Amino acid sequence: MSKQDFYQTLGVQKGVGADDLKKAYRTLAMKFHPDRNPGDSAAEHKFKEISEAYDVLKDADKRAAYDRFGHAAFENGGGQRGGRPGGFDFGTGFADIFDEMFGDFMGGRGAGGNARGADLRYNLEITLEDAFGGKTAQIRVPTSVTCDACSGSGAAKGSSPTSCNTCRGNGRVRAQQGFFTIERTCPTCHGAGRVIEDPCRACHGAGRLQKEKTLQVNIPAGVEDGTRIRLAGEGEAGVRGAGPGDLYIFLALQPHRLFQRNGADIYCRAPIPMTTAALGGSIEVPTIDGGRTKISVPAGTQTNRRFRLKAKGMSVMRSTARGDMYVEVNVETPVNLTKRQQELLREFETESKDRKTNPESEGFFTRVKEFWDDLTEN
């Protein structure tokens, strides 16, 4: 059976660049790696094929020879280099590829396979007032902590972990499969490089226990919705003495009954009596810092008019500055009128007919009349 074209094996075009070639190989190698497909001979065979194809095509000289002569370039001693056909060293060559592609994914090839503790997430709701002034919050977080009985070693008191005889402390073992040397996590110590013959009674050899921690979180003034606060080393404890993860606090602001926030600015909608809007006057509004302030309303104020209160908005993080506050008024139509109030309003309406006291409505209905007249003429 003839070999498949190396470019087809990697799923790339003949003129592919080095970066795209490497990316294609990495994707396939991650998919068909024997450690991810234990006992799957088809996946193992595919992994060998893509590794061979990549080793040839990543080398400029080998690739040039392959492009000219195909697989024949490496048969019958052709293109020999470094003592192997075509220079394809299945021992050290594959090890280099393995290190390059899987070093981070497999946790490295050296000893010390203990895993750093997982990072944790905690969602914390705060009020807009908390976000304005900042606060210190106390939270309780369920997590894994280092076992005090064994100080995280996992071994019973008076004993200690010993070097694994299977991998000799490396955490990984190699097996020869044909031309390939396959490296896998040690099945005895599971990558730790050490074994515990007498496990700790408290943690059963894990080196950590489940516990609820109480922590203080400093929330700075000016934080926004979705702000993330990192508490280094407050995540889960690592396995058997490895370093802990981090705790990430995600802040969510509760809706406020009076204010809406946009960045450092605050918006408030305030209803005002029709008489105040018409005659002018003042209204008093609250501010986010717990105070109050007066706004002068000029005569003839209309709905949706916006008043700016400088530096009455939110705090700005890491600054003494503050945003602005905007108050938008809504002119309220009076309800539940007495008979006398109705009479007064009718008198007002009569007095207003020739005074142009409602220019916006008068202008609108003038345009409506012109529109209807145009329709009649057409």
Image (spheres, rainbow, N blue to C red):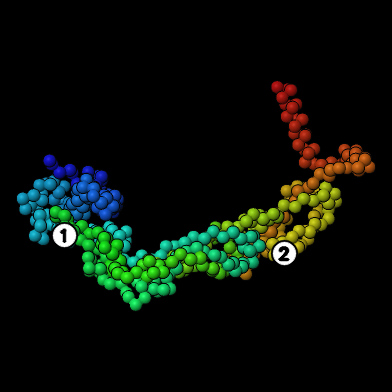
Question: Is 182 placed left or right of 138 in the picture?
Answer: left
Amino acid at circle 1: Gly
Measured Cα–Cα span from mark 1 to mark 2 = 73 Å
- Dot 1: what SS? loop
Of the numbered discs 1 and 2, the one sitting upstream in the chain is 1
Task: Give the position of the N terminus as an image quadrant.
Answer: top left
Crowding around mark 1 (Cα neighbors within 10 Å: few <14, some 14 to 19, many 20+) is few
Q: Which residue is mark 2?
A: 290
**Residue situated in front as seen by the camera: 158 or 177:** 158
Question: Is 207 placed left or right of 168 in the picture?
Answer: right
Question: Is 66 placed left or right of 138 in the picture?
Answer: left
Residue 157 percent coordinates (x, y): 36, 75
Q: Are marks 1 and 2 in contact (CB under 8 Å)?
A: no
Q: Is residue 299 above or below residue 376?
A: below
Q: Is residue 60 above or below residue 3?
A: below
Front of the two marks 1 and 2: 1
Residue 57 percent coordinates (x, y): 20, 52
Q: Which residue is mark 1?
A: 91
Residue displayed at 22% across by 65% down: 166
- Dot 2: what SS? loop
Q: For residue 13, which quarter of the picture?
A: top left
Crowding around mark 2 (Cα neighbors within 10 Å: few <14, some 14 to 19, many 20+) is few
Question: Is 81 placed left or right of 96 in the picture?
Answer: left
Residue 4 percent coordinates (x, y): 17, 43
Amino acid at circle 2: Gly
Residue 244 percent coordinates (x, y): 42, 68
**Residue situated in front as seen by the camera: 222 or 115:** 115
Q: Is residue 299 above or below residue 161?
A: above
**Residue situated in front as seen by the camera: 338 or 195:** 195
Residue 66 visible in the current orientation: yes
Q: Is residue 38 above or below residue 119?
A: above
